[in-house]
Amino acid sequence: MANKNSCTYKIVTDSTSDLTPKLVEELDVEVIPMEFIFGDEVYHNYPDAREMSSKEFYGRLRAGEMSKTNQINTVTFLETFEPYLREGLDVLYIGFSSSLSGTYQCALEAIEQLKEKYPGRRVVPVDSLAVSMGEGLLVYYAALKQKAGATLDEAAEWVSVHRFSLSQYFTVDDLNHLKRGGRLSAAAALFGSMLGIKPVLRIDDEGHLIPAMKVRGRRQSLDALLNQMEKSIQQPENQTVFIVHCDAQEDAKYLYKQTKSRVHPKEIIVNDLGPILGTHTGPGGIAIFYLSGNRG
């Protein structure tokens, strides 16, 4: 039976959280789809990929097509938050890193407007300072806290504190997608200019994407992710590890097997990196998310 505290607020996040449809249902969270665009066609990034599969999306990128993305606007946030406030519920909104998108700022603008209309209700925003299933991992734990009876303020506080213990490491096949999308500086992109160099990137405490290390070869870059996790993960037997990939199934299987045998976490969940972030990473990217002592 749900604790009464868990029934007083709804957790809302963006589709950049890359939660699986099963998790969205189990956690009972609302995911706002962001938009991605090929040519004149606008698509919505739902967790169940109903408008375009991950395979098709990355296939189109490999074929040379260019995708663009739109942030969630203030009107969409108003339309999402208001029904819950009208029902007498509060909202915990956990958003995509404000250092990489204007989406969080649009949420804040919507919240300000709703304060006047619903003075007795609250929408509490938390900037995850995270991306993809890193953001998703914070939502996952917040929802588990909610189900265990945490109040809105307790869940928001947990996320606000533990976002700085979230390790988020990536490796990509080609840095040009990140450079072109403005998610990585031209200087940082030079890491990938040397023959055979595969950069490992991470999200820092301010939610920026920065180079972490450089290694030679794809397998070595995957092993670098594993080595970093092995060194820094805290109490893995109590943790859920999230892995995402950009149409890189075999690499994801390798990471899964190695994580299971070397780190022994309680659970490992693998998903596709959605089109919003996939636009900027390109095909072949892979990332791993877990809690550690800090983000380094």
Image (tube, rainbow, N blue to C red):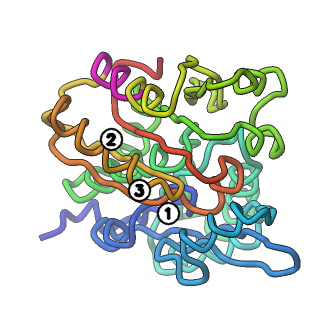
Look at the picture and state if 206 lies above or below 101: above
Kind of residue sitting beneath label 3:
Gln
Residue for badge 3: 249
Look at the picture and state if 185 lies above or below 81: above
Look at the picture and state if 81 lies above or below 215: below
Secondary structure under badge 2?
Answer: helix
Boundaries of the magenta span = 225-232
Q: Residue at x 47, y 53 (%)?
A: 248
* Spot occupied by residue 290 in the image (x, y as percentages of width and height): 35, 35
Circle nearer the viewer, 3 or 1: 3
Q: Which mark is residue 255?
A: 2
Circle nearer the viewer, 2 or 1: 2
Residue for badge 1: 12
* Of callouts 2 and 1, the N-terminal one: 1
Q: Is residue 142 left or right of residue 172?
A: left
Between residue 190 and residue 162, name the one nearer to us: 190
Quadrant where the N terminus is found in the figure? bottom left
Kind of residue sitting beneath label 2:
Leu
Between residue 111 and residue 120, name the one nearer to us: 111
Q: Residue at x 66, y 59 (%)?
A: 276
Q: Quadrant of residue 179?
A: top right
Look at the picture and state if 228 lies above or below 237: above
Q: Is residue 274 left or right of residue 137?
A: right
* Of callouts 3 and 2, the N-terminal one: 3
Check disc 1: other Cα within 10 Å, few if <14, some if 14-19, many if 20+.
many
Q: Residue furthest right?
A: 40
* Of callouts 3 and 1, the N-terminal one: 1
Q: Quadrant of residue 10?
A: bottom left
